[in-house]
Amino acid sequence: MGRRPVERTVADAGELSLPPGPPLPRPVQAVLMAFARPAFLQGCLRRYGTCFTVRLPAGATFVVVADPAMIKAVFTGDPDLLFAGEAERMRLEPIVGRESVYLLDGNAHLRWRRLMSPLFHGEMVRGYGELARPAVLRQLRRAPSGRPIPVHRLMHAIHLELSVDVVLGIEAGERRENLKRLLDRTLKWTTRRPRVAMAPWLQRGSRWGPWAWMRRDIAALDEALFEEIRARRSNLGSDERPDVLSALLRAAEREGTPVSDRELRDQLVTLFVTGLEPMAAALPAALLLLLRNPPALARLRRELEDGQGVYLEAVVREALRLEPGRTLVGRRLRAPLQLNGYLLPAGTTVTPSIRLTHRLPEVYADPLTFRPERFLERAPDTYTWIPFGGGTRRCVAAGFATLEMKTVIATILTHGNPRLATRRAAAGGPRVILDTPR
C-alpha cells in the first residue's frame, strides 16, 4: 500500500488532536516497539504517512515524524516548549544519572553543553584521533588471524578499547582491564539487553531479576569511575593527558565552574551510552556494507593507498544513513504545539525518526542501496541526514564519533585485510576473516 500523506487541518485552533496511528492496544504496541521496532514503524509510515501516533502503556503518547520539514520545526522549536531531557529521562536516567547533559533541559543543559562542546572540536578531536589508531591496532593484534570472528564482537571489542583510551585515558594494567570489564557489563543494558533499561517502571524497586542485576552492574562501574575521578583530580596540575576526563577537569577549572564527582560521572557514562556507544552499532554495519559491495570497497582501498579521505567520508555518511546508531530522538511538550495541522496536547512526546527519514525515497533515490557516491554528488540538506540529532541538542561528540568510524574502517582495511567468511553464519551473526600481522 502506498504512503498516505497526512494533510488534515484542525478546524478550531483550540481543539487538541493527534495524528492517526495503529488502533492496537497499548501493550501490543509496546511489544512491537521493543521487539520489532523497524518493521512496526515502517508499516506505520506506509499506512499513515510521515506523521503518526504510537501509544504505549502508562499513558505514554508518541507522535513520530519523518518529514524533514516537520523535523526542522521540532529541532528548531522553542526549547522552553520542547524538552528533550524529559523525553528520555524514564528510559536512561537509571544508567546515565540525573545530572547527565543528555537529560537536562534549560540553563542546566546549556551550562554543560558550553563546557563540553569545545572538547569535541578542532585540535581536541585531532588529539583524540591520535589515541584512536593505536587502540584499533592493539585490538586487531588480539583478534584471531585467519579464523572467522563475528563482526559485531570484533567491532564491540575495538570500540570498547578505543572508548576507554579516549574518554578515560587509563594506561595498560589491571585497573584499565577492570574498568573495561565493568563498562562492558553496563553497556550491555543499553545494547544487548535494552528492553530492561527501556522499561524500568516495570521493575523499579525490585530486589531480584534483571532490574536488580542492572543496578549492581551500575554500582560497580560507579565505584571504579569515582576512584578514577578522585585520582585524576589529585594530579590535575601536572596532568596534560589528552583524554576527555582530563580535558573536562581542566576546562571546569579554567572556567571557574565547580563540578562534583557525581556530575563528572554522569557526563562520562553519557558519552559512553548516548555519544559513543551508538557507534558500536554503526561500525559493524559499515564494515559489512563495504565487504558486500566490492566496487565501493575497491574504490576505498585505492583512495586509502593514495592517502586521500573524500570517499572514506562518503562511506561513513552513507553507512550512518542506512544504519544510524540511534533511531529515535524525542521532545516532550510542555504546552500544546501546532504541527502538521494538528494541535498536539501537552505531555505528548514528538519523536523524529532518524531511520525512517534516512530511507524516504523522495529524499534519497533508491534508499535501501548502499551508494556512498550520493554524498559526493550532493550534500544532504540539514534535516535529511540526522544520525546525531539536530538543533541545540545535536550530539556534542558527533565530530569524534565520525572520526572514530573513519579511523576504525581505514585501520582495519589497511592492517587487517578483512573478508567475509563464506560459511553460513551461526550464532553471533555475520563473520569476517582477518589477516593481521603478529
Image: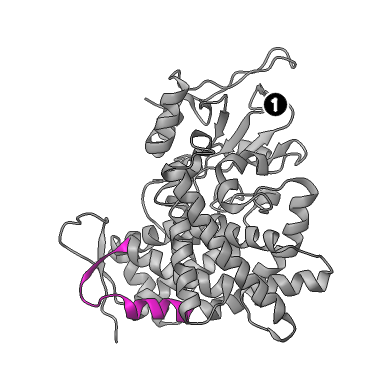
Which class describes the residues within 10 Å of circle 1: few (<14), some (14-19), or many (20+)?
Answer: some
Q: Which residues are magenta?
A: 133-151
Q: Residue furthest front?
A: 207
User: Does the stretch in magenta take in 15?
Assistant: no
The amino acid type, in three-letter code, at marker 1 is Ala
Q: Position of residue 161 (x, y in %)?
A: 45, 72
User: Does the stretch in magenta take in 135?
Assistant: yes
Classify 247 as above or below 205.
Answer: below
Mark yes or no: residue 170 visible.
Answer: yes
Q: Position of residue 401 (x, y in %)?
A: 54, 64
Q: Nearer the viewer, residue 371 or 20?
A: 20
Q: Residue furthest right?
A: 256
The image quadrant that residue 249 belongs to is bottom right
Classify 268 as above or below 204.
Answer: below
The residue that label 1 is drawn on is 346
Q: Quadrant of the C terminus?
A: bottom left
Q: Quadrant of the N terminus?
A: top left
Q: Residue at x 58, y 59 (%)?
A: 269
Q: Residue at x 75, y 71 (%)?
A: 251
Q: Residue at x 49, y 22 (%)?
A: 21
Q: Position of residue 359 (x, y in %)?
A: 44, 43
